[in-house]
């Protein structure tokens, strides 16, 4: 079964209803995660760049969603933003590894996606290395998540099942094709609530984006 077949046939790829989106938005707002609903990918991209000021320091976490929408390319290649990822690509991991880890963990803006979000306002993010998690948890000044509405699930239990049964096989296939090595769920972040109001924003996109 190909990744494309899995996406089209899986229940975890179904788009959430307007009622589900609204329940999720309200719950996230209660949990101090400011939530914006975008009508499509182009609208989501526009909203991202309404939030991030020109010349801001930005780190783009690895994300199929950001790549699909052209957000990562705009941040890292346009020259209009202070791209942490571009700087990291110019550094030597043999001699500057610790400095690189600090830079990746503490940007002004960190942008990426998530693997599931519940209708009760909880967010699930898995990682093989954990490199993006410190920034999401506390180290970045601001966090932006761009999330396709197929990632909305009713409960935390279903979110974890989505991760194991759907996200991991797709990400494993992508990783094997791109890097020649598979993926795994080594570290898991569950965000119940954002401590600092105004720090974290989620853009829910009315499209099937990412895994």
Image: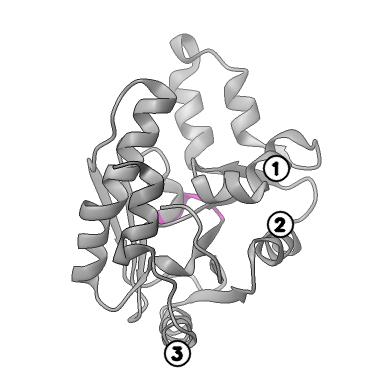
Q: Position of residue 77 (x, y in %)?
A: 74, 34
Res 122 label: none
Query: Which one is closest to the eye, mark 1 or mark 3?
Result: 3
Q: Which residues are magenta?
A: 137-141
Res 52 label: 2
Location of mark 3 (residue): 19
Q: Is residue 187 left or right of residue 137?
A: left
**Separation of residues labelled 2 and 3 (CA atoms):** 29 Å
Q: Position of residue 36 (x, y in %)?
A: 59, 75
Q: Earlier in the sequence, mark 1 or mark 3?
A: 3
Location of mark 1 (residue): 75
The residue depicted at 37 percent of the width and 44 percent of the height is 3
Identify the secondary structure beneath mark 3. helix
The residue depicted at 28 percent of the width and 42 percent of the height is 1
Identify the secondary structure beneath mark 2. loop
Q: Nearer the viewer, residue 116 or 16?
A: 16
Choose top left, top right, bottom left or bottom right for residue 199: bottom right
Residue 174 lies in the magenta stretch: no
**Separation of residues labelled 1 and 3 (CA atoms):** 33 Å
Q: Callout 2: few (<14), some (14-19), or many (20+) C-alpha neighbours within 10 Å?
A: some
Q: Earlier in the sequence, mark 2 or mark 3?
A: 3
Identify the secondary structure beneath mark 1. helix
Q: Position of residue 9 (x, y in %)?
A: 33, 59
């Amino acid at each position: 079964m190909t990744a494309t077949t899995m996406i089209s046939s899986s229940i975890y790829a179904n788009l959430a209803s307007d009622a589900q989106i609204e329940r999720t938005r309200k719950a996230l707002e209660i949990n101090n995660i400011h939530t914006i609903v975008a009508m499509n990918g182009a609208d989501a991209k526009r909203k991202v760049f309404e939030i991030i000021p020109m010349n801001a320091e930005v780190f783009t976490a690895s994300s199929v969603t950001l790549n699909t929408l052209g957000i990562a390319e705009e941040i890292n290649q346009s020259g209009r933003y202070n791209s942490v990822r571009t700087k990291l690509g110019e550094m030597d991991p043999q001699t500057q590894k610790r400095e690189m880890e600090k830079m990746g963990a503490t940007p002004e803006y960190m942008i990426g996606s998530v693997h599931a979000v519940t209708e009760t306002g909880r967010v699930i993010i898995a990682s093989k290395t954990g490199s993006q998690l410190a920034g999401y948890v506390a180290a970045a000044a601001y966090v932006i998540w761009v999330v396709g509405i197929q990632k909305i699930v009713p409960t935390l239990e279903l979110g974890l099942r989505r991760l194991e049964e759907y996200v991991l096989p797709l990400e494993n296939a992508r990783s094997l094709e791109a890097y020649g090595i598979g993926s795994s769920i080594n570290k898991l972040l569950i965000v119940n609530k954002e401590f600092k109001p105004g720090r974290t924003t989620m853009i829910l996109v009315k499209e099937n984006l990412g895994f």
